Image (tube, helix red, strand yellow):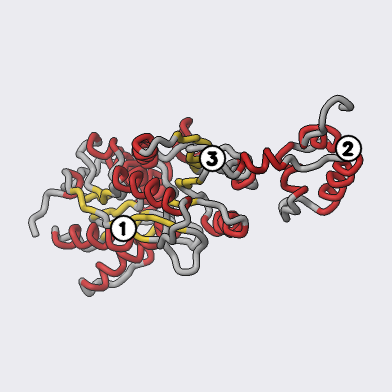
């Protein structure tokens, strides 16, 4: 130690914490409790630790790297990634590469301080978030990023008063179009399968679009026709089983995601229900496997290619100091075999 200047890693070793915790404590981050913060500062004084101004200046330089943080989704199998996001990841990487940026991909939940781990640590110039788990908890972390003046953008809901900049799908309009299509085909007992709590704002907007279409057609909103489900085949399967076990009559289903809809299809087919002759199915997302189910799944398409381009383009604008507003991308109806069988 006598032959070299002490570093934050030396402080971390003596304090028994991570180097990231030392950085947060020395910058008075509220994420570090007061006792730990004071212990770290005392060790820094004992070691005569001084912040390296050259290192600080290096942190202000561009890395030409974007951090892409995905929400870990335990309902999607061993990959832990919602398949809807896989094609968007490819689009983000492609859009970044054309602008001479690399992409650093990681899961979100492994950290409590995204800014310290990426921008402040000089690992990335900005952050893109895909997925969020429970939205109410997620917003708390985004508020913290705003306090740190981090450069970030999210794919997700666009809501009044939310932190940061978001780009998302017009979920309301997309679900309304899907429901209107089913209504034109003659279906009247349309079930909506998907969670509609405040913690799932995108599914909630899809449900609201579904309700708007029914009300426009002078149909009553039947609460029995809505069943909560997460984004997974198993959750959709269990929801369909629950509907049938409860004796609820329905002639069509709008799944809040393609994975939910695919699970519904499996549950119905196991009971000898013909799709679409007996019950029509509509999904939401247009994941690649939707075109290869039997029958092929009708769905609402979120254009992942355009989404990836816009996320990268607008994040770079934010990093250059431009003011960017949140906005929605229109959704497009993709009609396949799972909701045919009746004429309007």
328 left or right of 201? left
Residue drawn at (29%, 59%) of the image: 175
Q: Which residue lies furthest to the top in this view?
A: 3
Disc 2 is placed on an element classified as loop
* Quarter location, residue 136: bottom right
Total of numbered circles in the picture?
3
Q: In this view, does 192 lie above or below 215?
A: above
Q: Nearer the viewer, mark 1 or mark 3?
A: 3
Residue 260, x across and y down, in percent: 36, 46
Disc 3 is placed on an element classified as loop
Instruction: Return the disc, 1 or 3, that comes first in the chain's sequence.
Output: 3
Q: Residue furthest right?
A: 46
Residue drawn at (18%, 62%) of the image: 183
Disc 1 is placed on an element classified as strand
Residue drawn at (30%, 56%) of the image: 329
Q: Residue 191 carries which label?
A: 1
Q: Which of marks 1 and 2 is in front?
A: 2
Residue 312, x across and y down, in percent: 39, 46
Q: In this view, does 178 lie above or below 76?
A: below
Local packing at callout 2 (Cα closer than 10 Å; few below 14, some 14-19, many 20+) is some
The residue carrying mark 2 is: 47
35 left or right of 329? right
């Amino acid at each position: 130690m006598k032959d070299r200047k002490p570093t934050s890693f030396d402080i971390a070793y003596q304090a028994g914490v991570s180097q990231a915790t030392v950085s947060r404590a020395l910058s008075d981050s509220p994420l570090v409790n007061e006792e730990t913060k004071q212990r770290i500062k005392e060790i820094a004084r004992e070691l005569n630790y001084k912040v390296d101004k050259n290192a600080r200046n290096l942190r202000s330089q561009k890395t030409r790297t974007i951090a892409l943080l995905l929400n870990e989704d335990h309902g999607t199998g061993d990959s832990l990634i919602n398949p809807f996001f896989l094609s968007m990841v490819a689009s983000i990487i492609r859009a970044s590469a054309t602008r001479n940026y690399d992409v650093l991909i990681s899961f979100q939940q492994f950290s409590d301080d995204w800014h310290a781990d990426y921008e402040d640590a000089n690992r990335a110039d900005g952050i893109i978030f895909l997925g969020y788990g429970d939205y109410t908890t997620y917003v708390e972390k985004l508020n913290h990023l705003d306090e740190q003046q981090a450069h970030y953008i999210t794919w997700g809901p666009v809501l009044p008063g939310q932190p940061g900049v978001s780009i998302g799908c017009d979920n309301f309009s997309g679900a309304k179009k899907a429901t209107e299509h089913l209504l034109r085909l003659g279906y009247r007992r349309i079930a909506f399968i998907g969670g509609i709590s405040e913690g799932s704002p995108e599914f909630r907007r899809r449900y609201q679009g579904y309700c708007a279409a029914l009300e426009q057609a002078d149909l009553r909103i039947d609460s029995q026709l809505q069943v909560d489900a997460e984004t997974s085949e198993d959750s959709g399967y269990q929801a369909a089983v629950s509907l049938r076990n409860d004796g609820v009559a329905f002639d069509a289903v709008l799944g809040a995601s393609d994975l939910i809809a695919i699970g519904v299809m499996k549950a119905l087919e196991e009971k000898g229900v013909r799709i679409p002759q007996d019950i029509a199915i509509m999904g939401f997302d247009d994941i690649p496997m939707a075109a290869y189910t039997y029958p092929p799944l009708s769905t609402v398409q979120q254009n992942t290619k355009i989404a990836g381009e816009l996320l990268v383009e607008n994040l770079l604008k934010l990093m250059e100091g431009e003011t960017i507003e949140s906005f929605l991308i229109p959704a497009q109806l993709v009609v396949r075999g799972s909701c045919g069988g009746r004429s309007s």
